[in-house]
Image (cartoon, coloured by chain):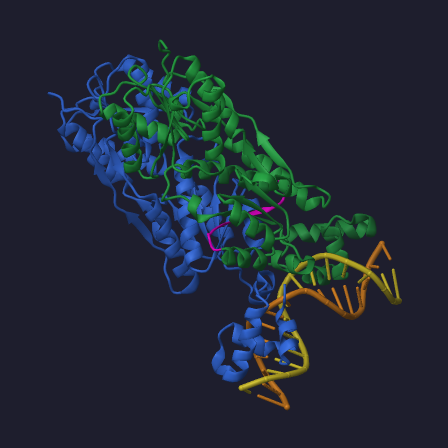
Chain colours: A blue, B green, C orange, D yellow
Amino acid sequence: MITIKEMASIVGVSPTTVSNVIRGKTKEVSPELAEKIQKVVEEYNYVPNRSAINLAKNNSNVIGFVMSTNSVLYDNIVQDFFTGELIGALEIGVRKRGYFLMIYSSDDMEEIRSFVSSWNIDGIVALGFSYESAQILKNIYKKPLVFIDGYFLNDEHQYSNVGIEDYRGAFEMTQYLIREGHRKIAFFSDNYIGGDYARYMGFLDAIKAAGLSSDCGYKYKIEKKLDGIKKGVEDVIREHPKVSALFFCSDNYAVSAMGILSDLGIKIPDDISVAGYDDAIVASFIRPKLTTVKQSTGEKAEIAVEKLVAMIENKTEKPEKITLPVTLQVRDSVKKIEA
Amino acid sequence: MITIKEMASIVGVSPTTVSNVIRGKTKEVSPELAEKIQKVVEEYNYVPNRSAINLAKNNSNVIGFVMSTNSVLYDNIVQDFFTGELIGALEIGVRKRGYFLMIYSSDDMEEIRSFVSSWNIDGIVALGFSYESAQILKNIYKKPLVFIDGYFLNDEHQYSNVGIEDYRGAFEMTQYLIREGHRKIAFFSDNYIGGDYARYMGFLDAIKAAGLSSDCGYKYKIEKKLDGIKKGVEDVIREHPKVSALFFCSDNYAVSAMGILSDLGIKIPDDISVAGYDDAIVASFIRPKLTTVKQSTGEKAEIAVEKLVAMIENKTEKPEKITLPVTLQVRDSVKKIEA
DNA sequence: TTGTAAGCGTTATCAA
DNA sequence: TTGATAACGCTTACAA
């Protein structure tokens, strides 16, 4: 690895001059010299030393993707598809803009603090943080910070976030279900906070808005594991046999529930209708094809990086809540019934 | 961000002494001083500056996960589940061992070279490299390098690789298919190189080993997009109506084909049997549950990091080809038929 | 046991 | 237009 100093002595100039042509400050150096130096730079395949640059400039050009561990792969079948696609898209956006992507997952705020300040991380894309941990993160990290799918109550104007219309998607799906004649609908989620809570509220409000009584909508909290989904599905069938539609907070739950229903000899959508959320790839693999709410993970990532880099490079950039649209994706898993 | 020098002047000692206690070289410093310094370190929440350490020690403690772009998310539905799980598991393994994970995807070897040397990356986990690009990578990067799912012909002893028994898995699956009475089997892949070629060879050899004539096995090359899978499935049905079993090189293709078959009114496994490879999560979501070959992506990542870190920390560590076992996962998508 | 000082590869200030 | 030089924060001989 050749250094600036070495190249300087090869050409017979000072390191400063070499540095200047490398950084394109060509107006500060004569064309002849610039060309001579450029030649050497290329001949020796010069690559700048990032540690040295970072030390001197007190930054890093790295963007950290930090995930709160409870959202992480492995203990949660719902997340890994999403996370994989997200990371892939983040990498592309980050690289495109001349930055580098470091990944770090932890629930320990002290660890995260130490990670980001040790590396002098220029900006963070944060996933899976509760309101509480988001507050802490914002306190310990004073540089640009963009959350993905965060919910921050009344503090929203203080946080940069890119999310989707969780509420509206669920509202419209529920409206659709009602329009198709369903009058007993069960909603399933593994939690009722943040985006999933918003989806639940959309569900509830659509029922209200349709003038239906509140006992038209049932709420089920399911465990993340496969067994938990099975239990949820069996519970609803036993407790509320009149339920004609199942609305899951995510496609992966919906798809896995479809398998379980099939095992029970229950036909979809003839015996019961199923709706999902996210429009994951499986949604169009499975039969019947899943009716769901479509969101774009890739776009989420791209927008998050775009906003983050804007904040890094333009100090006046303000925090912003960005809400991406969702669309109803009507396929074959919901049946029209006589009300 | 407090520095060693600042803490030194606070305690009234030299930076060296502070540095020593921070790095646990406590035998070189008196207990009283050590304690006093330790206290200040904690009081000020000292976090070391990675750029400075890296510059001084000429390393980085970062492990790069570099993907050849042709394997990357987005243009290939097969890969993103796998990649997501892999990255998650890599992150855990890397962090556990005191390293950091940087992600970089490119097909341009010059870009990759510049990335790794600029950051002084300590070691690389490489995914999706052809034999040719693997050779180039090995030439431009002289530090520890572990491939995932690479195939290196006769050069294997020169490369560290963690892969799976691609050949044996396909061999056993095909054996199983034959045992179940299937005599016309079609094999589908989007490529016939590396691991997928090995799977194809396992398929072919099992047919030979069973004493069947070579026209018992058909080979189909499909496009990666959904349309391509559809075309492949339709082709086989038209060209070889006697085919009773479809063996896909990956679960995602298998699952997507199951949907397409269902659209065609073809029942699985009654009309036709389907087998997959990988044991992706969808394999147990779908109905009938998919009979497949099980591999562990998480284990792949863990072993890869383990080997890589061993190579980084122990110079005598030799390149090694690690082949993880696969097991037949018999479920419900293959029917026993009368031969 | 503790401290001095050089060095890692850049950037940036200021002088020539 | 070019070049010295200090500085970034740390490690590491080597000296005291």
Q: Nearer the viewer, residue C5 or B87?
A: B87
Instruction: Residue at 53%, 40% (x, y): give it.
Output: B150
Q: Nearer the viewer, residue B72 or B33?
A: B72
- Can residue B106 be found in the magenta stretch? yes
- Say if residue A72 shows up in the picture: no
Task: Tell me the magenta residue range.
Answer: B96-108
The answer to which quarter of the image holds residue B282 is top left
* Residue B79 x %, y %: 42, 38
- Say if residue B240 shows up in the picture: yes
Q: Nearer the viewer, residue B134 or A273?
A: B134
Q: In the picture shown, does residue A270 fall above or below B12? A: above
Please state if B248 lies on the left or on the right of B43 as rendered. left
* Residue B53 x %, y %: 66, 57
Instruction: Residue at 55%, 66% (x, y): give it.
Output: A57
* Residue B8 x %, y %: 72, 60
Q: In the picture shown, does residue B204 fall above or below B316? A: above
Quadrant where the N terminus of chain A sits is bottom right
Instruction: Residue at 60%, 39% (x, y): give it.
Output: B154
Q: How many marks?
A: 0
Q: In the picture shown, does residue A136 fall above or below B120? A: above
Quadrant where the C terminus of chain A sits is top left
Instruction: Residue at 26%, 15% (x, y): give it.
Output: A266
- Can residue B32 be found in the magenta stretch? no
* Residue A134 x %, y %: 44, 45
Q: Residue furthest top?
A: B338
The answer to which quarter of the image holds residue A7 is bottom right
Q: In the picture shown, does residue A262 fall above or below A202? A: above
The answer to which quarter of the image holds residue D14 is bottom right
Q: Nearer the viewer, residue B120 or A338?
A: B120
